[in-house]
Image (cartoon, rainbow, N blue to C red):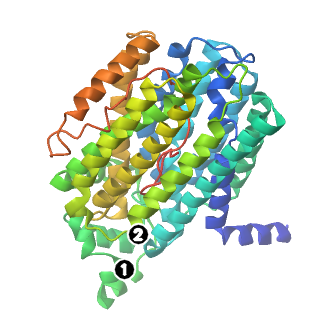
């Protein structure tokens, strides 16, 4: 019994390592780039895509806000465990379930997976000091990137060289997610959180923040010795009683109003939401586009290799933005406008070409340019916000992007909407792109080039991949 306590004590000393291990195995999913060929192949023979794939968007939207609010209240670990369980159930359904209804439930479970992703990065806040948050966050993002890249390469090699069936790629994914679930149980339970379980020092600091810019001049390190003496005699943790739950929610609402009342944050957040909506639609549905350009029935697909390269290119462009010495507050909008036009051009090429290699190349350009743009936007938003307010901003922006994506899905993709065929939707994409090419570049009136360049092409409706590796906490980056 004593030895078990020692093991648990030793494990508890390294929560960052445990979290990174969880992140690696949760992203180690070699079947992901080949999901559409698997669903439309001989195993599942799924053809009613307009009835199945939109479920992910709807479930993600419905689950996101409750998860966003309860994650902090429950102190992260239970939500991470919930994500691990959702991973297992998702791939069990993929492997053994049949029929449209079963696949709809599978998409609902994956919506749970993506909605609970927010707990992964939020957990970091509770286990490290604020001055180490950015460094530890970069570690956790990097390990996820390595996991996804390695999985994509592994899947591609097993398909191209060994000729392994897609079914067994999903078996490997299930095993990897099971390992991740085990490590999620080993994570120590945090003693504090961003909003509902703060220390007295954090409460005292936050009470002095009157605007999003105050984080520059008021933080824990700025307290004088007398202030520290006053709070040191108090309990280190402030639990929020039940009768104060609504008070905390009101404080969150006030923080949201404070953040978005700043013009710079509002406009960059608006672009972020529009861009993320368009990015998700393209990335999530691109496998179906590839399947349309070149059916993988009797041919070897190279989806895994393309996803691996695109992930590395996206990381490289994000790193480039972080190290280059440019005053983004001055040149950011011009850069955003120019690169958005180039990104729209890549989408033109993806939709018009009938050559799979050109389609692959355009996809690589599209993702790399988006990562560059979203990194700039993240820097502009996070520059003047505390971690807590940035987390709120991130959650609200993601929710707005999902609302836009849901509207597009209902009208264009869903079988209960227009349920347009491929040719019609290509025509709509061409029309929207021609319109956005004439749109002004982020002139604080319409930030639309990226967000609606091609948000509603139902030739791709399998939502997979991860959110961009920019800004805490994350979500689903590729």
Alpha carbons under labels 1 and 2: distance apart: 38 Å
Counting residues from the start of the chain, the first of labels 1 and 2 encountered is 1
Within 10 angstroms of label 1, few (less than 14), some, or many (20 or more) residues? some
Contact check, label 1 and label 2, Cβ < 8 Å: no
When the figure is inspected, residue 37 is found, relative to residue 373, above or below; the finding is above
Q: Position of residue 394 (x, y in %)?
A: 36, 50
Within 10 angstroms of label 2, few (less than 14), some, or many (20 or more) residues? few
Q: Which residue is mark 1?
A: 231
When the figure is inspected, residue 276 is found, relative to residue 318, above or below; the finding is above
Mark 1 vs mark 2, foreground winner is: 2
Say the numbered circle drawn on residue 323: 2
In the rendered structure, the answer to whether residue 179 lies left or right of residue 263 reads right
In the rendered structure, the answer to whether residue 430 lies left or right of residue 140 reads left
Residue 28 visible in the snapshot: yes
Quarter of the image for residue 397 reads: top left
Q: Residue at x 28, y 21 (%)?
A: 431
Q: Residue at x 65, y 47 (%)?
A: 26
Residue nearest the viewer, comparing 94 with 222: 94
If the image is split into quadrants, where does the N terminus sit?
A: bottom right
Residue 250 visible in the snapshot: no
Residue found at the very far bottom of the displayed protein: 225
Quarter of the image for residue 65 reads: top left
In the rendered structure, the answer to whether residue 438 lies left or right of residue 137 reads left
Q: Residue at x 30, y 29 (%)?
A: 433
In the rendered structure, the answer to whether residue 290 lies left or right of residue 432 reads right
Q: Residue at x 74, y 50 (%)?
A: 182
Q: Position of residue 354 (x, y in %)?
A: 51, 23
Q: Position of residue 424 (x, y in %)?
A: 39, 12
Quarter of the image for residue 456 reads: top left
Residue nearest the viewer, comparing 159 with 182: 159
Provide the secondary structure element on which disc 1 rests: helix
């Amino acid at each position: 019994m004593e030895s078990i306590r020692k093991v648990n004590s030793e494990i508890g000393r390294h929560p960052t390592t445990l979290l990174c291990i969880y992140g690696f195995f949760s992203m180690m999913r070699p079947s992901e780039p080949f999901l559409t060929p698997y669903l439309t192949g001989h195993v599942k023979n799924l053809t009613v895509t307009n009835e199945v794939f939109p479920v992910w968007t709807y479930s993600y939207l419905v689950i996101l806000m409750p998860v966003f609010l309860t994650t902090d209240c429950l102190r992260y670990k239970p939500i991470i465990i919930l994500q691990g369980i959702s991973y297992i159930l998702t791939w069990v359904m993929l492997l053994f379930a049949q029929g449209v209804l079963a696949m709809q439930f599978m998409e609902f479970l994956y919506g749970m997976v993506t909605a609970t992703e927010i707990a992964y990065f939020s957990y970091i806040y509770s286990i490290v000091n604020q001055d180490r948050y950015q460094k530890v966050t970069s570690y956790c993002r990097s390990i996820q990137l390595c996991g996804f890249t390695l999985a994509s390469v592994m899947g591609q090699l097993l398909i191209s060289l060994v000729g392994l069936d897609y079914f067994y790629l999903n078996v490997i994914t299930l095993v990897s997610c099971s390992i991740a679930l085990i490590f999620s149980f080993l994570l120590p339970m945090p003693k504090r959180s961003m909003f509902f379980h703060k220390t007295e020092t954090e409460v005292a600091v936050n009470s002095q923040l009157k605007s999003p810019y105050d984080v520059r001049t008021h933080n824990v390190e700025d307290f004088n010795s007398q202030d520290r003496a006053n709070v040191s005699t108090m309990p280190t943790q402030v639990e929020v009683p039940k009768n104060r739950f609504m008070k905390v929610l009101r404080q969150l609402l006030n923080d949201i109003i404070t953040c978005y009342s700043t013009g710079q944050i509002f406009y960059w957040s608006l672009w972020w939401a529009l861009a993320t909506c368009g990015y998700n639609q393209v990335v999530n549905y691109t496998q179906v586009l590839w399947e349309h350009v070149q059916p993988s029935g009797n041919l070897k697909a190279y989806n895994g290799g393309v996803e691996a390269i695109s992930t590395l290119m996206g990381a490289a462009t994000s790193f480039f933005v972080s190290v280059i010495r440019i005053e983004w507050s001055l040149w950011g909008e011009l850069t955003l406008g120019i690169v958005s036009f180039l990104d729209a051009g890549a989408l033109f090429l993806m939709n018009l070409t009938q050559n799979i290699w050109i389609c692959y190349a355009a996809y690589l350009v599209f993702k790399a340019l988006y990562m560059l743009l979203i990194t700039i936007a993240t820097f502009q938003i996070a520059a003047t916000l505390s971690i807590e307010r940035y987390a709120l901003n991130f959650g609200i922006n993601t929710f707005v992007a999902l609302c836009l994506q849901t509207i597009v899905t209902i009208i264009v993709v869903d079988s209960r909407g227009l349920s347009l065929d491929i040719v019609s939707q290509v025509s709509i994409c061409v029309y929207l792109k021609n319109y956005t090419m004439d749109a002004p570049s982020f002139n604080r009136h319409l930030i639309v080039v990226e967000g609606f360049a091609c948000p509603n092409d139902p030739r791709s409706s399998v939502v997979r991949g991860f959110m961009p590796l920019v800004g805490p906490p994350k979500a689903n980056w590729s």
